[in-house]
């Protein structure tokens, strides 16, 4: 009996994540309550976000600012949703984790864009800060390079800063798709961290790309944090940083702990699968709280001056349509 139990334990401890059917068959009353509460949290987080989107559609003109706010504020509910799916269907955890990584890579680029859009766009940002000094010895790349000289805000520097975040929004989806192809082919495994395996090289490349992307975010934030104090940019940046730490570092720490043997096997979960399972449950609770806090800071009233500053693109489009209509009427009159 003991030998059979050990064989079963060894089978689960060395296997891939269990199927959804195995999860449902092993549910007990405490687990049912836990799953129900976490699923309800994920649903509420997405409902809160949908309510916020409806508010932004009604109160904010259709400009780039509204789009970027929707992207950035949607990070927490999207992560809660993907984590909930991964909790119920452990075999899909690779796909849900990749979806989360890709979305948050876009959010990093959008957050930088949002800080610029709060000034009314690139031209307004340049008009306000052009030729003013900016500190480039910021983390995580150059925080120790205090000898670096101050740079001046220019169109070229803005292009470089945007390129720094855009490369992650482009590079990470490409690597994630490549990872997914290798995983389906059976040649990618999170447990294989040997130099001959693809996991260590892909993770290293993503780490370097992420660090490079975080550097221009810090530069822009240090420049605008005083000017955008009334727009609550500091708590928004704090929530963004917390979300990044929870989605990136927390998962890495749990995964390393599982590989080091700190997380025991618990059938039907192997140590690695159990570590991912624990991370998904934690993320649902954490993103639920962040969603509620984000609603406080992103769902705010815009005064008339701000709305007028957001209107130029809409006014230009209306003027263009009116001009075309005038030409069309003139042609009809001539005929």
Image: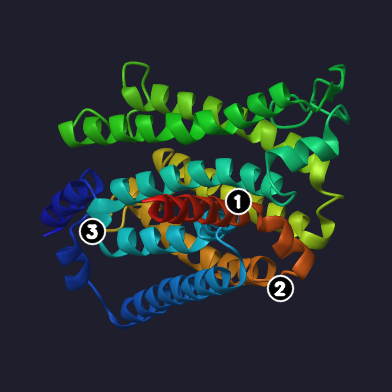
Q: CA distance from mark 2 to mark 1?
A: 24 Å
Q: Is residue 12 above or below residue 139?
A: below
> Which residue in the structure is indicated by mark 1?
316
Q: Quadrant of residue 69?
A: bottom right
Query: How many residues crowd around disc 2 within 10 Å: few (fewer than 14), some, or many (20 or more)?
Result: few
Q: CA distance from mark 3 to mark 2?
A: 50 Å
Q: Quadrant of residue 152?
A: top right
- Provide residue 265's location: percent of width, then percent of height: 32, 52
Whichever of labels 3 and 2 marks the residue nearer the N terminus, that label is: 3
Whichever of labels 2 and 1 marks the residue nearer the N terminus, that label is: 2
Tag on residue 301?
2
Query: How many residues crowd around disc 1 within 10 Å: few (fewer than 14), some, or many (20 or more)?
Result: few
Residue at screen point 36% across, 81% down: 33
Q: Is residue 231 above or below residue 165?
A: below
- Provide residue 267's location: percent of width, then percent of height: 25, 58
> Which residue in the structure is indicated by mark 3?
268
- Provide residue 185's location: percent of width, then percent of height: 16, 31
Whichever of labels 1 and 3 marks the residue nearer the N terminus, that label is: 3
Q: Secondary structure at mark 1?
A: helix
* Camera-side residue of 320 and 62: 320
């Amino acid at each position: 009996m003991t030998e059979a139990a050990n064989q079963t334990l060894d089978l689960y401890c060395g296997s891939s994540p269990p199927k959804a059917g195995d999860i449902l068959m092993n549910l007990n009353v405490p687990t049912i309550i836990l799953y129900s509460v976490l699923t309800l949290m994920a649903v509420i987080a997405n409902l809160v976000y949908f309510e916020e989107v409806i508010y932004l559609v009604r109160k904010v003109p259709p400009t780039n600012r509204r789009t970027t706010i929707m992207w950035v504020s949607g990070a927490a509910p999207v992560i809660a949703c993907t984590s909930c799916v991964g909790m119920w269907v452990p075999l899909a955890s690779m796909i849900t984790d990749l979806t989360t990584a890709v979305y948050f890579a876009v959010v990093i680029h959008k957050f930088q864009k949002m800080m610029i859009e709060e000034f009314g766009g690139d031209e307004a940002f340049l008009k306000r800060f052009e030729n003013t000094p900016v500190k480039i010895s910021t983390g995580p790349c150059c925080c120790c390079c205090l000898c670096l000289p101050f740079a001046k805000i220019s169109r070229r520097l803005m292009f470089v800063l945007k390129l720094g975040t855009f490369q992650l929004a482009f590079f990470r989806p490409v690597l994630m798709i490549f990872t997914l192809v290798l995983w389906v082919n059976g040649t990618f495994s999170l447990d294989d961290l040997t130099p001959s395996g693809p996991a260590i090289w892909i993770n290293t490349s993503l780490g370097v790309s992420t660090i490079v992307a975080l550097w221009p975010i810090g530069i822009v934030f240090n420049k605008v944090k005083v000017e955008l104090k009334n727009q609550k940019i500091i708590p928004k940046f704090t929530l963004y940083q917390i979300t990044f730490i929870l989605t990136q570092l927390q998962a890495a720490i749990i995964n390393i702990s599982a590989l080091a043997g700190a997380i025991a096997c618990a059938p039907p979960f192997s140590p690695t699968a159990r570590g991912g399972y624990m991370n998904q449950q934690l993320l649902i609770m954490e993103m639920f709280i962040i969603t509620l806090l984000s609603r406080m800071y992103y769902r705010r009233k815009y005064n008339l001056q701000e709305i007028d500053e957001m209107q130029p693109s809409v006014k230009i489009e209306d003027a263009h349509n009116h001009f075309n209509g005038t030409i069309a009427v003139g042609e009809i009159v001539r005929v």
